[in-house]
Image (tube, coloured by chain):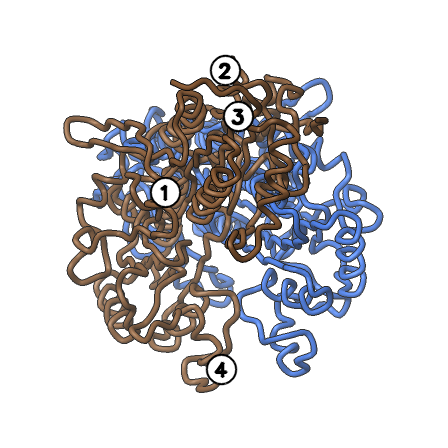
Chain colours: A blue, B brown
Amino acid sequence: MSILKGACVVAQSGGPTAVINASAWGAITAALENEHITRVLGAAHGILGVLGDVLYDMSEEDPAELVKMKHTPSSALGSCRYKLADPDEDDTDYARMLATFRKYNVRYFFYNGGNDSMDTCNKISKYCQRQNYECRIIGIPKTIDNDLYGTDHCPGYGSAAKYIATSCMEVWHDAHVYDTGMITILEIMGRHAGWLTGASALACHAGAGPDLIYLPEIPFDMEMFLEDVIAVYKHKGKVLVAASEGIKDSAGQFVAEYGTRLHEHDSFGHTQLGGLAATLAAIVKGRTGAKVRGIEFSLLQRCAAHCASLTDIEESVAAGRAAVERAVAGETDLMVAFRCEREGGYKCEIELLPLDIVANTEKKLPREWISPSGNGLEEQFIEYALPLIQGDTPMARRNGLPNFAKLRKVKAGA
Amino acid sequence: MSILKGACVVAQSGGPTAVINASAWGAITAALENEHITRVLGAAHGILGVLGDVLYDMSEEDPAELVKMKHTPSSALGSCRYKLADPDEDDTDYARMLATFRKYNVRYFFYNGGNDSMDTCNKISKYCQRQNYECRIIGIPKTIDNDLYGTDHCPGYGSAAKYIATSCMEVWHDAHVYDTGMITILEIMGRHAGWLTGASALACHAGAGPDLIYLPEIPFDMEMFLEDVIAVYKHKGKVLVAASEGIKDSAGQFVAEYGTRLHEHDSFGHTQLGGLAATLAAIVKGRTGAKVRGIEFSLLQRCAAHCASLTDIEESVAAGRAAVERAVAGETDLMVAFRCEREGGYKCEIELLPLDIVANTEKKLPREWISPSGNGLEEQFIEYALPLIQGDTPMARRNGLPNFAKLRKVKAGA
């Protein structure tokens, strides 16, 4: 092992999850404990904090507050959605970044994010190498979308899945209370992959889930959908539908965007703004005359720390810690990933994958995990997802409400 | 005490809450244990089950399943929204009801519901008296809206308030993650009273709540609202707004219904369906050009048993038990109510109120609990609401998800 002494930067990127702070906490505490890491810096708003030299000194934080990051949703350091240019075309950002790295002697960079963040890690790493600046760079995955290639699952997914399945069960009970007909349409996140919407099938497994589930992996056919809904409605008098915000028809158009088109034709009802649930609800109402309700889980599903999965929290912390330990041990240009076994009990091991394998590839739900008719999930999905939602958050509460971390964010001087 | 032996009927009415089943469980178990109650019947879908003679024999239920009702949302027996006619105009329903009562020798009727249910209790009671049929009738309140007159608060409110405050805190964290401007508008239930939307102020008290809160008690002025929002936006770059679905302008029109009007004028944007959050979001976006997001908490807030208040659960059970015990002790024509003290620690005692005082009167938030500017809550409200959200549900879980009650629902024979 080659010893490299210097400061580290921990940064967070992309959309919030319930556990991205758990990973950051894992990385920060492992770094604070590590003798080779001379200083632990947190970047304000991801890579923007590095570009703009807004770094927080994590040793200035009260450890009692810092530990609450394990159960605090969203990104405690702040996040960004910033895509670096191709350094061959414009290396301005890279030069500024390297200047910050040199200023604080940053030799370790840990980036906590999704696809784009892995791409950013990859670009920074290559630039540093070309400039002969030694910096070890490890990506720590997070995305509720669960669409990162190469890892069994992503930190953040288990908690979102647990919230979605729990909420589906509760809505199921709500929707079955009256003696009258009712069609309820749930809109669940996931623009390109059906992992989140698929999680509603866990509620079916628990006996109170959707009758029909529509994923972006399967081209959406409005007539077939209406037939499905009407068939269940005739049979049961109640229908619970879970649909991904990202479902598209065979022409590739998002169904959520039908509103504009409907406005022109005006055959199904009124113009829609406000997404898929409202659009589908209006169409189903127009066709059936039934009482129809559209519900958007909205961003509650990505930040519901109060319903986080303990498994997800613990794995997220472990991913953050592993990033630091493996970097200090000499590894770089990698992303932390999970390799899991489910037969004979769930086991999750950490492995590291090359960044360029991971970046910019989206993992979809396998076709064979989706029912042949395309409107439900198979047992393989349940076996896959169930271990990821186990255990409840031990989040501290104060006065009946979550006791979330409040960081001091003391700006680092050089 | 005059001894009255006979069967009892427990029935549930109105919209779901997280704890209406906790009250039903309290009543059912107290009745099963009571020597004067010869049989415990559950009515399918509230009063409809009595009218249609669809009654379940609660002694046929597995006690291990029955006890899960304490943590199961919505109405396990089924609910209804059925308003009885004035018996002087049409006594058909009353005659059918009395026939069912006679058939099973029902001498106790416990109705778990809101305003309308208390009115129903009152009517049934008077009818039975006129027919010289002795039946003791006690109402058990429930409504997330918290608008029942005469009681400090209603079972169901504390759990909804806890969910709303928790979700507001989580959305606050989500909304503050980026370095860019953002206005988020939360739509919260409560058509006529601001108790639920007011609960968002508990999140402010915990340091992560809305900047502005709009309640139905205060006539809504769009220009003042836009001024408020713009002022906060200029100052902080982020705005979190909580608005009740029931806000009305000074002309008495629901703001949620502006969509139709906007369509005619088309000055603010496009036509809206989908309620207040979308309507306000479009208007604010049109005026400010900022990134604006509308989020409807929707019915998740009324059935979120996973985030229920332990205080609410325990008080709901106690309300159900008290109804049975007091009826057996000879009381009738009353509603269970809470009388609470907050100074020197929270104390909640049960008292019984005459049904005709309670029925058909709505309790609003006192004006002095709302800030003078009308867009926030005062400390008095926090002191009122905070004790009601204390403690977390001990809900059993299985496989990482709620383990809700599944009743056998064995139909009672005469």
Circle 4 — which element? helix
Circle 2 — which element? loop
Mark 1 and mark 4: Cα distance apart in space = 34 Å
Residue depth check, mark 4 versus mark 3: number of the one nearer the observer: 4
The disc label shown at residue A391, or none: 3
The disc label shown at residue B161, or none: 1
Q: Which chain contains the residue that carries disc 3?
A: A
The amino acid marked with disc number 1 is Ala
Q: Is residue B64 above or below residue A300?
A: above
**Number of numbered discs on residues:** 4
Q: Which chain contains the residue that carries disc 1?
A: B
Residue depth check, mark 1 versus mark 3: number of the one nearer the observer: 1
Residue depth check, mark 2 versus mark 3: number of the one nearer the observer: 2
Say which of B371 and A68 sits in front: B371
Mark 1 and mark 3: Cα distance apart in space = 25 Å
Which residue is the site of mark 4? B263
Q: Are marks 1 and 2 on the same chain?
A: yes
Circle 1 — which element? helix
Residue that appears at 50% across and 39% down: A140
